[in-house]
Amino acid sequence: MNAPPAGSLEPEPGKKIHLALVGSPNSGKTTLFNALTGLSAKTGNYPGVTVDRRRGLMKHPIGDRDVLISDLPGSYSLHAISEDEAVTSKVLKGELDGGKPDGIVFVADATTLQRSLPMLADILRQGIPTLLVLTMVDELKARGGDLDLFRLQGELGIPLVGVVGNKGLGIDDLRVRLSDPKSWTTACAVPEPNTEARFAWADTLIEKVERHPVSASTLTQRIDAVLLHPVAGLVVFLLFIATFFQAIFTWAAPAMDLFSGWMDLMADYVSANLPASMLTDLLADGIIRGVGAVVVFVPQIALLFGLIFLFEASGYMARAAFVVDRVMGWAGLEGRCFISLLSSYACAVPGIMATRSIPSPRDRLATILVAPFATCSARLPVYALLISAFLPNTKILGPFTVQGLTLMGLYLLGGFSAILFAALFKRGLLKGASLPFYLELPPYRFPSLTSVMLQVWRRLKVFLKDAGSVILAGSVVIWFLLNFPKADIPEGMAEGPAHQVQVEQSYAADLGRAMEPLFEPLGFDWKINIGLVGSFAARELMVSTLAVVYAYDPNASIDPETGEPDDEFVGLRQILTTPDPKTGVAPMDFPTAIALLLYFVYALLCLSTVAVIKRETGGWKWPIFMIAYMGVLAWVAGFVGYRLAGGG
């Protein structure tokens, strides 16, 4: 007996029920997906967040069959004009995963139902059992709106369920419906496929079911009068950015000091209690101090993501995209490009993937070419280390300090450079017309702290996983390069000088010295060059590599007053700035630190980013181009910064 085709009303016994979650951006679709599956997919109160499918099994299904739910990218139409909309269209046509889904769950915001109905008309034409979920029904009532849901269900001829996804209201009833898609019917008279017919059908349907229209939010209008103002909106945006980065330094400092103390105590305990051996040195210096030098920045990264997610969920980020769209227009790009660049501030990998929502191929490629300029969280440990070590924490503008404003300046420099080079590319290499930009401004909403915390924890797990894999592996490799080949150390030499001799005769030293002719004009010595090598695997490795290189350096292990070895590990910041008692020269000076900061603003030091660029552009042409042009730009910026800061 032949099995029925995928998407039929009678799926195979025992086979998972496959449902596709479809809807326009900002309709509450991903929040609903999380409520049904228990997963913690990222949500944001602006379009362009979901750029690929997320899949999960429904918790507590009714019956004995699992329900697999695919959260598809937000779309306004099945007539795809961008990569993410194409994913939705292909899944519903059965061109992915071997067949059509067994049912479509169409998610629409009850407060903006009229904007979702034209796409629902496209969905109904697919001939797949469909269920309509109206989200934010509580907000509909709060804003004075009223819909005749029974008549709406009758006019559409499909089942309808109202929910409040972030509060779990209506979810149990929805689970019952989702477990039996064969009971859904499609009895609606589907309008013709042309655009005018679909919109006319939507207008007629709204006239029939709308008892009272939704009133505009007075609070939203008042706030938007300021935030969307051509001048005031930009001022608020800049104040928001300044406060944002100042908070990262000020609020996270106590927790960072605590983490740093724990790592030092752990390394000291291992060194003191395990037998003296190469493995003990590897564990204490290569692993604990190496990985620990990056892990101590977890509080700052958690705060960074927490603030970003709070403002995303509140609705402000959509306004920020609108404000910055004026600047993006000068660069020949549009607001969807800003959203991709904004995502790159967390990590360039999802930011580059988010370019799939950009319909223009030229705009998409231009955004990919400049996305790594956005200051990702991997740069934060390097910035924080150098800024805190070489710049004072003095206040200069109210609560704003030199350190906080410097960090903001580095972030703004990356963003400005992205827009500048995007403009250059669009006017030369990628010259061409852009498509119109449409951005829906959602009402302001109070973020769910639980959802924000879940999203922060999810990002921290990714960061810690990297620290436990890439950073750990890189730290171990660097440790071996520093400790082999074994140097001929005179018998009886103290530990500090012996370590110095070993480092200077290691493979790592040979590699660093081979790079000196290239980087000496920037003030980089061979030890810093070793850090640059490590940072190609992951930018965070710059910090852990320096920690391994200087772990037992005489500059850190000899007391400047007594000249005797100091048993207490003094912190990487102090190591970099403490002069050698014999030469009076510190491992790093202010001009070198400035050059290194500027180098990290521009250089493409991330293999993961290179890999995703290759995948998204379909070859090695553009990744190689980006490594080359960003490398040259980084060297020039570092050289200029070094000279202006007094180096050379």
Image (cartoon, rainbow, N blue to C red):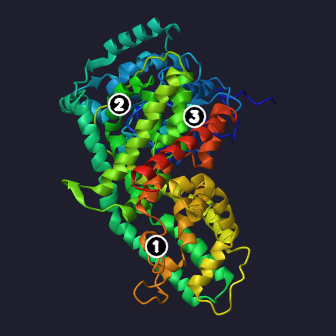
Labelled disc at residue 19: 3
Mark 3–mark 1 distance (CA, rounded to whole Å): 57 Å
**Mark 3 Cα shell of 10 Å, populated few (<14), some (14-19), many (≥20):** many
Hey, which residue is sitting farthest right in the picture?
Answer: 1
How far from the left and from the top, in percent, is residue 511?
Answer: 68, 61
Q: Nearer the viewer, mark 3 or mark 1?
A: 1
Residue at coordinates 45% horizontally, 22% vertically from top-left? 332
CA neighbours of label 1 inside 10 A, class few (<14), some (14 to 19), many (20+): many
Q: Secondary structure at mark 3?
A: strand
Residue position for label 1:
575
Q: Secondary structure at mark 1?
A: helix
Give the structural element (helix, strand or loop) at label 2. Answer: helix
Residue 351 vs residue 18, the one in the foreground: 351
Of tags 1 and 2, the one toward the viewer is: 1
- Look at label 3 and name its amino acid: Leu
Where residue 469 sits: x, y (%)?
62, 61
> For residue 291, which quarter of the picture?
bottom right
Give the mark, 1 or 2, whose residue is nearer the N terminus: 2
Residue hosting label 2: 324
